[in-house]
């Protein structure tokens, strides 16, 4: 689990090699930054820190740097970016890499260097010798979307680094309001922690008061009001979004995405899929699956098909100029109430 690896880094229990890969940029950047800040001082940065883009520099040049003794410090940190040779893709650049040089280094890494390989790729080529060697010898961080429990642990850990505690109800509410985007959650936690610096406690009341709602979460709340047949409150959320200059077509697109998600969750649940497997199939966060599953109980298949048709028709009517875009969503919400 990535949080466990971060704790090791904070306690200066470093691995000589880190392989950090995946499409969750926040985790890649956070891991990289934690290694840098805990391994070397700011004064050592000029002498003992290097970054290499492997689309521009041969890997053997970076390895030569990794084997160089640190200057006026205990260790060096060398970052390698864009290691395309770890994937099945063909390199678009003209750089030729002596991968054997990296393989040899992995077998006997410099004890005074932390080599960090960051790969913004969803998958690596597991058949390649170099990929196998890295995964065997190094600390591996797969930068993927956190599960619900991992996300909650991360929120608690992030709050603790600010010297505050966040209770369970507040954690749940924060995810409900701000979503699962780690960058947005970081911004919200920083703000909440600053506000709670006197009491050192973030509770649900503070989260409700201060947390900015993402557009997606506002749409979820809007759908939830419709599910509860509270159309007046759904319309109020919609009017607030218009006051915030949100584009109606964008709102319509997110509404359509939410109902397609509800339909997909309902269908896959019927086939016996669990929450994690549904999330993998639909390529969304498991927490969104959990919330959509709750909403799915309020619609049958015929209703969901009708709703998706209404949204598709509304998109066509707006783009063809048959109806004002602001009015279209208002009418949709009223029709939805009648279903």
Image (tube, grey):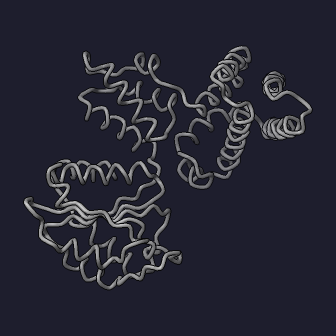
Q: Is residue 118 above or below residue 235?
A: below
Q: Position of residue 261 (x, y in %)?
A: 67, 43
Q: Residue at x 55, y 31 (%)?
A: 214
Q: Quadrant of the C terminus?
A: top right
Residue at the far front: name it: 46
Q: Residue at x 41, y 64 (%)?
A: 119
Q: Position of residue 317 (x, y in %)?
A: 88, 36
Q: Quadrant of residue 134?
A: bottom left
Q: Is residue 254 above or below residue 201?
A: below
Using residue 326 as the reference point, say whether residue 134 is left or right of it: left
Q: Is residue 21 above or below residue 173?
A: below
18 vs 91, nearest the viewer: 91
Q: Is residue 258 above or below residue 278?
A: above
292 vs 43, nearest the viewer: 43
Using residue 249 as the reference point, say whether residue 108 is left or right of it: left
Q: Residue at x 34, y 70 (%)?
A: 135
226 vs 242, nearest the viewer: 242
| Count of numbered marks | 0
Q: Quadrant of residue 61?
A: bottom left
Q: Position of residue 167 (x, y in %)?
A: 35, 25
Q: Residue at x 41, y 82 (%)?
A: 96
Using residue 274 as the reference point, say whether residue 105 is left or right of it: left
Q: Position of residue 176 (x, y in %)?
A: 51, 30
């Amino acid at each position: 689990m990535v949080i466990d690896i971060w704790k090791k880094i904070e306690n200066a229990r470093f691995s000589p090699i880190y392989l950090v890969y995946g499409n969750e940029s926040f985790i890649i950047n956070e891991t990289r930054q934690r290694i840098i800040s805990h391994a070397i001082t700011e004064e050592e940065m000029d002498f003992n820190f290097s970054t290499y883009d492997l689309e521009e520099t041969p890997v053997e040049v970076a390895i030569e740097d990794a084997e160089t003794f640190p200057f006026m410090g205990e260790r060096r940190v060398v970052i390698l970016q864009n290691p395309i040779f770890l994937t099945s893709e063909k390199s678009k650049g003209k750089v030729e890499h002596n991968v054997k040089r990296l393989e040899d280094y992995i077998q006997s890494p410099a004890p005074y260097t932390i080599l960090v390989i960051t790969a913004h790729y969803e998958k690596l080529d597991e058949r390649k010798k170099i990929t196998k060697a890295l995964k065997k010898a190094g600390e591996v961080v797969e930068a993927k979307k956190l599960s619900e429990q991992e996300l909650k642990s991360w929120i608690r850990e992030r709050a603790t680094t600010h010297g505050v505690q966040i209770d369970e109800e507040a954690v749940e509410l924060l995810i409900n309001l701000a979503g699962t985007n780690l960058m947005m959650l970081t911004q919200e936690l920083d703000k909440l922690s600053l506000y709670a610096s006197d009491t050192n406690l973030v509770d649900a009341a503070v989260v409700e008061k201060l947390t900015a709602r993402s557009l997606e979460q506002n749409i979820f709340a809007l759908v939830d009001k419709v599910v509860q047949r509270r159309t007046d409150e759904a319309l109020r959320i919609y009017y607030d979004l218009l006051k915030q200059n949100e584009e109606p077509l964008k709102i319509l697109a997110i509404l359509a995405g939410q109902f397609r998600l509800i339909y997909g969750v309902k269908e896959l649940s019927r086939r016996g899929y669990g929450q994690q497997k549904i999330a993998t199939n639909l390529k969304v966060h498991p927490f969104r699956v959990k919330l959509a599953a709750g909403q799915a109980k309020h619609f049958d298949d015929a209703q969901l098909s009708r709703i998706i048709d209404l949204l598709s028709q509304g998109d066509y009517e707006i783009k063809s100029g048959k109806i004002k875009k602001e009015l279209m969503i208002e009418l949709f919400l009223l029709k939805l109430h009648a279903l």
